[in-house]
Image (cartoon, rainbow, N blue to C red):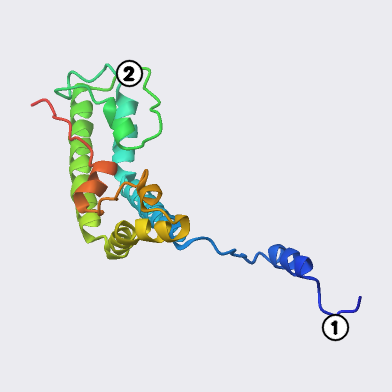
Amino acid sequence: MSEDEALPSDSILAAAADDGATIVFDVPSFVRRGQDVEFLLATLDERCRNGRLAMLDMVHTRLRQWAKLAIGADDWRDAFAVPVAYLWDAASAPAPNWARHAGTRRARRAVARDLVASVERFNARWAAYVDRLDTRLVNDAIENYNKYYIMEKECVLGSSRLAAQRFTPLAAVSTASILDAHPPIPVPTVVA
């Protein structure tokens, strides 16, 4: 077969797949609508996770400094009013490497104050970041999903009862819902 001859359709599909091109076979519109909403929500979630993690750098630094002065998760009483072991999970920080010997009381209290200040700064920056997020595209997609999904599915299935089964309308994305999924860090109290 020469290069000028037409390729069979299977060869065209295989060649396109090798080129990295995406071949989309038509799926019902309700399926595409659901996939679009799912993709937008996953993208927003990933953006929030990455943005939050980027803002946690200084909190991670302060947690490492605290771990260098504390001999374990239970070593907090002279600097904090409550245990602070929860901070590592809340800040998505790597597991601590505890010190062999506790630091001086003065050094521990200084690092504790710095840690609290870093958590407070993070919380303020994180709230501002979430507040600035433009969720119009996601919320428009959710609104259209809630409005048209059952109707489009009914066109395919031919039954409104079957189309409505297992359908749950999605709530719009809000600052509060994002902060529920990606919360600020509870601020520990430093001993006076």
Among the 4 quarters of the image, the one containing residue 68: top left
The disc at residue 72 is 2
Instruction: Please tell me which of labels 2 and 1 falls first in the chain.
Output: 1
Q: Quadrant of residue 40?
A: bottom left
Residue tagged 1 = 4
Instruction: Name the residue nearer the viewer: 108 or 159.
Output: 159
Kind of residue at disc 1: Asp
Name which quarter of the figure residue 6 lies in.
Answer: bottom right
Name the spot of residue 112 as percent of width and height, x first: 20, 31
Q: Residue 169: percent from the left, percent from the top?
A: 29, 50
Whether residue 107 appears in this view of the structure is yes
The kind of residue tagged 2 is Gly
Circle 2 — which element? Answer: loop
Q: The C terminus lies in which quarter of the figure?
A: top left
- The structure residue drawn at horizontal position 17% and vertical position 35%, both measured from the top left corner, is 187
Please state the horizontal and vertical placement of residue 175, each as a whole percent of the image.
21, 52
Question: Residue most toward the right?
Answer: 1
Quadrant the N terminus occupies: bottom right
Q: Residues within 10 Å of mark 1 (few under 14, many from 20)?
A: few
The secondary element bearing badge 1 is classed as loop
Q: Nearer the viewer, residue 159 or 47?
A: 159
